[in-house]
Amino acid sequence: MYVVETGKLRCTKVFEKGQEPTYLKDYVPGEAFGELALLYNAPRAASIEAVEPSELWALDRRTFNHIVKDSAQ
């Protein structure tokens, strides 16, 4: 999972093999993406590309699982 600190990122997805990617949205500071892949252990369904220099915070699966287990106790 990633949280945008600064910059702008573009999200696109290829819906049919061989076609050009479809624009979905732009991510700006304060927004997050990748949470579904983290929660459901599934591959990401879209591509993210920086439109301008950006800084992100990342939460990897191992850290996420550790947080979930600790909060469950």
Image (tube, rainbow, N blue to C red):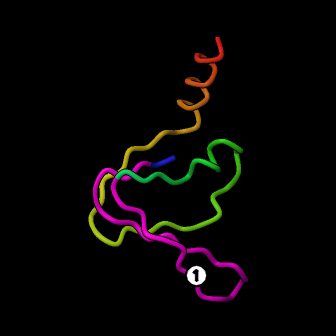
Q: Main secondary structure of the magenta part?
A: strand
Location of residue 41 by image quarter: top right
Q: Identify which residue is drawn at 51% across, 54% down.
A: 33
Location of residue 70 by image quarter: top right
Residue 34, relative to residue 48: is it above or below?
above
Q: Along the horizontal axis of the image, is 58 left or right of 60?
A: left
Location of residue 66 by image quarter: top right
Q: Along the horizontal axis of the image, is 47 left or right of 3?
A: right
Q: Quadrant of the C terminus?
A: top right
Region in magenta: 3-29
* Kind of residue indicated by mark 1: Thr
Q: Identify which residue is drawn at 56% across, 32% down.
A: 64
Q: Is residue 26 magenta?
A: yes
Mark 1 residue crowding within 10 angstroms, few (<14) / some (14–19) / many (20+): few
Q: Identify which residue is drawn at 44% across, 43% down.
A: 58
Q: Is residue 70 magenta?
A: no
How many numbered marks appear? 1
Residue 20, relative to residue 13: is it above or below?
below
Q: Along the horizontal axis of the image, is 7 left or right of 4?
A: left
Residue 2, relative to residue 48: is it above or below?
above
Q: Secondary structure at mark 1?
A: strand
Q: Looking at the image, which residue sits at the far top?
A: 73
Q: Looking at the image, which residue sits at the far bottom?
A: 19
Residue 39 percent across, percent down from the top left: 66, 41
Residue 44 percent across, percent down from the top left: 63, 58
Q: Identify which residue is drawn at 61% across, 25% down.
A: 68
Q: For mark 1, what is the residue?
A: 22
